[in-house]
Image (spheres, grey):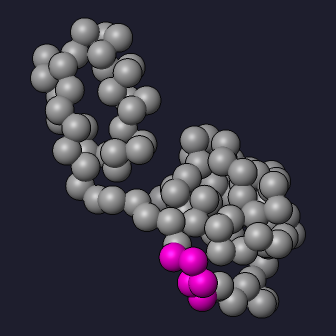
Amino acid sequence: MRILVTRPRDDAAALVAVLAARGHETLVAPMLEIRAPAPGAARPDLAGVQALLFTSANGVRALAALVPAAAPPGTASGSSTAGVPSSAGTVPSPGLVSSAGAVSSAGAGS
């Protein structure tokens, strides 16, 4: 089977390897390009922020590049995102977002 992979190029390699191991041919055609924040980019104002919800590993990496000091506790929408270190070496805890939008996570902090 031939499969179109539209993930960003840097994120596609692992999926392409899995698909190839299963005998599939892949065509990588990224639908977007992920770029690190530019040097000197404005840092987000996190004053008053009690927690962060990360929905992508790229978001965790971008925040870590912009906020090298400790950030508020965070939770992640999935296990891949939760596995990426955030600012100051913290790792977002895996969380679940219900259909109502409520976040549930044991390690999100209070």
In the image, residue 80 sits, relative to residue 89, either above or below, namely above
Q: Position of residue 87 (x, y in %)?
A: 75, 64
Q: Quarter of the image holding residue 102?
A: bottom right
Q: Residue 46's x, y, as percent?
A: 73, 85
Q: Exactly how many numbered labels are in the figure?
A: 0
Above/below status of 22 relative to 9: above
Q: In this view, does 62 lie above or below 11?
A: below
Q: For the N terminus, which image quadrant? A: top left
Residue 8, percent across and down? 34, 49
Q: Which of 53 and 99 is in front in this view?
A: 53
Give the prevailing secondary structure in the magenta stretch.
Answer: loop
Which residue reaches farthest left? 2
Q: Residue at x 17, y 32 (%)?
A: 27
Q: Give the range drawn in magenta.
A: 38-42
Quadrant of the drawing holding the C terminus: bottom right
Query: What residue is rendered at 52% in x and 57% in y?
Result: 58
97 relative to 48, above or below = above
The question of residue 39 being in magenta is answered with yes
Q: Is residue 52 visible?
A: yes
Q: Quadrant of residue 104?
A: bottom right
Q: Residue at x 69, y 89 (%)?
A: 45
Residue furthest to the front in view is 39
Q: Residue at x 43, y 64 (%)?
A: 35
Instruction: Judge whether residue 103 can be spotted in this image.
Output: no
Name which quarter of the figure residue 33 lies in: bottom left
